[in-house]
Amino acid sequence: MIVAPFVEADFDPPGQPAVQVNVYFIGMSLSEDMDDGANGYADIIGTYKVTHSGHGTKDGKIDMFYYDWDTLKGKNGYIKKRLLYSHKECSPIKPITVEVGMEEHNTIFSNTQLGSGSITVTKPGIYEIKLDKGKALIEVRVTPAVLYSEKCSYFYDQPPDYASSIVTSSGGYIYDWQLANMINMWIANRTGYANMVFIFSQCFGGGMIDDLKEKLKGTGDAAFLSASRHNEASWGLADGYTPSSWPEMAKRGFKKT
């Protein structure tokens, strides 16, 4: 038996490769002159919360930075990027919501509130979050994370004009819609079931799943696995496999037990 080490998986729609998603705070603008103190700048601090759909959240503080109204006069003021959130995920990226609350720091009096706001993004870019007295600037950057791609599991729908089949020992064919009807008729509607697992290890096996999934919807718990897509060949390891005979598989952690 050939076994592979356990890896965690994110189950997302198809897309290659996996990606590294970083969210940065990169600056802000003010809508009025708020310079105070000896340095002549607005001393700005804040808080943030990043919510990554299906993956988690992170919150924290934005340490003090400065805005020079005399120079910028309401234009965007950029600072050295500050990383707010980082995560590897299977592409495409899930929605990311960034919330910020900003204030101008005063030494003697209470801080002046600049306002709070949020934005939800689904693609990389530079975005503005509107506040009561200005705008906060964030950047969402997405870069390939090829080495992480093996931890992703993708699903691919078979096109409507495709039909898949399995070959019986007699040489006949059972098409995907026929198998789905048989399972639905003789198991789901006849005896019922608590759970079932379908594994298609043959070439083009992924094409057997869509009809089964549709026919068994709401009848019980069913899991579907395939070694290939509807238009893709599958490959197996020969009985005589040894790590030395196939170094590439050995690198992936496969071993013979």
Image: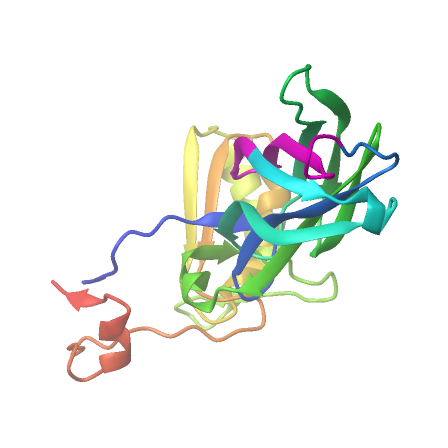
Residue 229 vs 87, above or below: the answer is below
How many marks can you see? 0
Secondary structure that dominates the magenta span: strand
- Residues drawn in magenta: 36-61
Residue 52, by quadrant, is top right
Identify the residue at image location x=28%, y=69%. Answer: 252
Residue 15 place in picture, x, y as percent: 60, 62
| Residue 47 on the magenta span | yes
- Towards the viewer: 209 or 248: 248
Q: Position of 46 compared to 69: left or right?
A: left
Q: Quick check: 226 left or right of 46?
A: left
Q: Residue at x 77, y 34 (%)?
A: 35
Does residue 251 appear anywhere in the picture?
yes
User: Can residue 73 be found in the magenta stretch?
Assistant: no
Give residue 49's position: percent from left, percent from top.
60, 32
Q: Is residue 152 above or below residue 56?
A: below
Furthest-front residue in this view: 38
Position of residue 68 in the picture relative to residue 179 (left or right): right
Position of the C terminus by quadrant: bottom left
Q: Quadrant of the N terminus?
A: bottom left
**Of residues 20 and 162, the one drawn nearer to the viewer in this rendering:** 20
* Residue 137 visible in the current orientation: no
Q: Residue 112, position in %: x, y?
A: 74, 21
Toward the bottom, the furthest residue is 245
| Residue toward you, 245 or 206 | 245
